[in-house]
């Protein structure tokens, strides 16, 4: 069965929310440079949230073969790309370098454990800003309000809600 455009766009919205929630949970676990909870369970949970956030980002903005990659979804890719780059204050080449950093982390430490001795976690501020931009674009330009039933319409607000929830859990 073929997915409709609205169904595909809703899935983009869901992936954006999965990214935001996992990034919020990951970041809430840190107190400066140390984890709020120092046990194998909490280290694993925190690391898994990071890994899922990176995986979701790659589905949305990093992997041209992915079904939800922005070029396959938005109705006006050149306009979207120009807006995204302006929002991130990056050039096209700068975004390619960032995309490579995210994919390297995904490929060498999430999908496979390659021979690298040091893990380099990419700058997640750029990931957050780019997914928020993508989500906002879908909400404001690709879907109608009735298509959004049950989904957050503001990813930044949703991120802060998830962050507060996680902070409460980490502090108990």
Image (cartoon, helix red, strand yellow):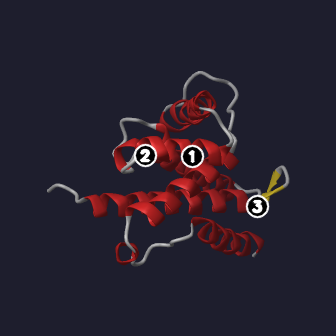
Please report contact status of discs 1 and 2: CB closer than 8 Å, yes or no: yes
Provide residue 26's location: percent of width, then percent of height: 66, 57
* Separation (CA) of disc 3 from disc 1: 36 Å
* Separation (CA) of disc 1 from disc 2: 11 Å
Residue at mark 3: 37
Q: Residues within 10 Å of mark 2 (few under 14, many from 20)?
A: many
Residue at mark 1: 84
Q: Which residue occupies the foreground of this view, 160 or 119? A: 160
Task: Name the side, left or right, on which 7 lies relative to 97.
Answer: left
Q: Residue at x 49, y 50 (%)?
A: 56
Single out the mark in the foreground, 3 or 1: 1
Please report contact status of discs 2 and 3: CB closer than 8 Å, yes or no: no
Count every numbered label the image shows and give the total: 3
153 up-or-down from 15: above or below: below
For mark 2, give the secondary structure: helix
Q: Residue furthest top?
A: 115
Q: Residues within 10 Å of mark 3 (few under 14, many from 20)?
A: some
Q: Residue at x 58, y 31 (%)?
A: 92
Q: Which residue occupies the foreground of this view, 114 or 101? A: 101
Q: Earlier in the sequence, mark 2 or mark 3?
A: 3
Q: Which residue occupies the foreground of this view, 142 or 57? A: 142
Single out the mark in the foreground, 1 or 2: 1
């Amino acid at each position: 069965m073929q997915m409709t455009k609205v169904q595909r766009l809703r899935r983009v919205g869901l992936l954006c929310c999965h990214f935001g929630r996992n990034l919020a949970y990951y970041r809430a676990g840190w107190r400066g440079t140390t984890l709020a909870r120092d046990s194998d369970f909490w280290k694993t949970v925190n690391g898994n949230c990071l890994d899922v956030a990176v995986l979701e980002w790659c589905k949305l903005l990093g992997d041209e073969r992915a079904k939800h990659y922005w070029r396959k979804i938005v109705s006006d890719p050149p306009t979207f790309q120009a807006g995204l780059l302006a929002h991130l204050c990056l050039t096209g080449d700068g975004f390619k370098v960032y995309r490579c950093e995210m994919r390297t982390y995904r490929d060498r430490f999430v999908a496979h454990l390659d021979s690298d001795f040091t893990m380099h976690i990419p700058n997640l501020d750029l990931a957050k800003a780019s997914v928020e931009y993508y989500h906002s674009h879908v909400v404001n330009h690709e879907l109608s309000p009735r298509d959004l039933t049950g989904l957050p319409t503001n990813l930044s607000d949703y991120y802060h809600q998830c962050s507060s929830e996680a902070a409460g859990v980490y502090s108990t």
